[in-house]
Image (cartoon, helix red, strand yellow):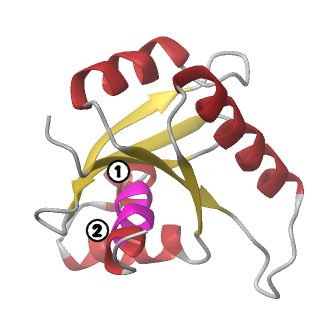
Amino acid sequence: MTRGTFLGFDYGKRHTGVAVGSRHSGVAQPLTQLAAQGGEPDWDSIHRLIEEWQPEALIVGLPLNMDGSENPISRAARAFGNSLRSRYNLPVHMVDERLSSRTATDSLLEAGVPLKRHKHQIDKRAAQTILQAFLNDGPR
């Protein structure tokens, strides 16, 4: 893939949503949801995605409390970002993800996706929302 491609992650202890986007198009698209194994991210699948897409950088959602303070999952997301950085030697940008799951759920409802299918879509749609926010912020 060309430079300017990014992978976005909505980290979770059970599932991690992944999205792809590019600086060229300015658009993020949901890609997949990866299941964690014993609380560990699916590093084999992440590796395959990085090999396939050859991203310029990785974008990780940072789940903050509404007042901006951190919580245990914030620290876990930062640790995930640090692991990505050390494993792949790529820049990792943390993006405030407050309300990304709510935005993803709302977009699914607007698209008419049945409620029972939401849980399989929310993580990758949240990753799309996180990556889109990064792309909307412009060059770094």
Q: Which residue is drawn at 36% across and 26% down?
A: 50
Taking the magenta stretch, the answer to whether it contains residue 95 is: no
* Residue placed most toward the observer, 20 or 109: 20
Mark closer to the chain start, 1 or 2 = 2
Residue 93 location, quadrant = bottom right
Image marks 1 and 2: residues in contact by CB distance under 8 Å: yes
Left-right relation of 29 to 38: left
Taking the magenta stretch, the answer to whether it contains residue 128 is: yes
Relative to residue 99, is residue 129 depicted above or below?
above
Q: Within 10 angstroms of label 2, few (less than 14), some, or many (20 or more) residues?
A: some
Q: Could you say whether the residue bearing mark 2 is in a helix, strand or loop?
A: helix
- Find disc 1 in the rendering and name its residue: 121
How far is mark 1 from mark 2, CA to CA? Answer: 8 Å
Q: Residue at x 59, y 45 (%)?
A: 11
Segment colored magenta: 126-132
Q: Residue at x 36, y 78 (%)?
A: 106
Quadrant containing the N terminus is top left
By secondary structure, the bulk of the magenta-drawn segment is best described as: helix
Q: Could you say whether the residue bearing mark 1 is in a helix, strand or loop?
A: loop
Q: Within 10 angstroms of label 1, few (less than 14), some, or many (20 or more) residues?
A: some
User: Which amino acid does the dot numbered 1 rest on?
Assistant: Gln
Relative to residue 34, is residue 18 depicted above or below?
below
Quadrant containing the C terminus is bottom left
Residue 38 in the image, given as x and y percentages of width and height: 72, 16
As drawn, the label of residue 108 is 2
Q: Residue at x 52, y 24 (%)?
A: 88
Residue 63 in the image, given as x and y percentages of width and height: 69, 64
Residue 18 in the image, given as x and y percentages of width and height: 39, 43
Residue 92 in the image, given as x and y percentages of width and height: 56, 47
Relative to residue 67, is residue 55 depicted above or below?
above
